[in-house]
Image (cartoon, rainbow, N blue to C red):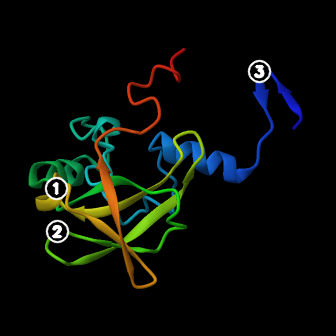
Amino acid sequence: MQQAGFGAVDVGYRAVQSLRLEKHYLAWAADITADDDPYEAGLALHTRPDKPELLAGPALRTIRDRGPARRLSWFTASADVVMHGGELLVLPDGRLTPVKSAGFGHTVGENIFCAYVPAEVAASSEFVVEIMGNRHPVRHHTAPPYDPQGVTIRA
C-alpha cells in the first residue's frame, strides 16, 4: 500500500465500501436516487425547506409535513451470510423489500446492509433476510455499528 500523505493511505474501492457501510454513509445510485426523498433516506438535517429562495422549498415542505411513507433502515447479518445487495429483506408482516447496499464490514466482522422499509414497521426488530431461498436472522440498527457517536470523524 502506498502512503498518500497527511496520514492517508491509498486503498481500494472495496475497502472504501466496507468503511462507508460501517458508518452508514450513503452512496448515490445505490442507496439514494432522485426518486427517494431526503426524509425517507434520513437526510432531513441537510434540507432547507423554509429557505424562501429555494426552488424546491414548497415540495420539501409538503414531503416533510406529510411524513415519510418509508425509511432507509440499516441491518447486520452474520459474517457467514454472503451479501452484495439486491437480496430480499422479509418484513415482519411477510412482505418483501429489496436490499439496497450490502457488504462485509471488516472492522465489525459482520455483513452490513440497508433497505427501505415501510414507516409503520421501521421500529420493529422482526426482520430476516432471504438469500437464494434461505432465510437468515438479522439485527436492526438505529446507529452505525462502528463509531456510532462519530467521535473518530471529528478527532
Residue furthest front in the image: 80
Disc 3 marks a residue whose amino acid type is Gly
According to the picture, the residue beneath numbered tag 3 turns out to be: 7
Q: How far apart are marks 1 and 3 (CA)?
A: 41 Å
Q: Where is residue 9 in the image (x, y as percent from the top left)?
A: 79, 32
Q: Position of residue 69 (x, y in %)?
A: 17, 62
Number of numbered discs on residues: 3
Q: How far apart are marks 3 and 2 (CA)?
A: 45 Å
Marks 1 and 2 in Cβ contact (< 8 Å): yes
Q: What element carries label 3?
A: loop
**For this rendering, which residue is in front, 104 or 122?**
104
Q: Quadrant of the N terminus?
A: top right
Disc 1 marks a residue whose amino acid type is Ser
Single out the mark in the foreground, 3 or 2: 2
Q: Residues within 10 Å of mark 1 (few under 14, many from 20)?
A: few
According to the picture, the residue beneath numbered tag 1 turns out to be: 124
Q: Quadrant of the C terminus?
A: top right
Q: Where is residue 67 in the image (x, y as percent from the top left)?
A: 13, 53
According to the picture, the residue beneath numbered tag 2 turns out to be: 92
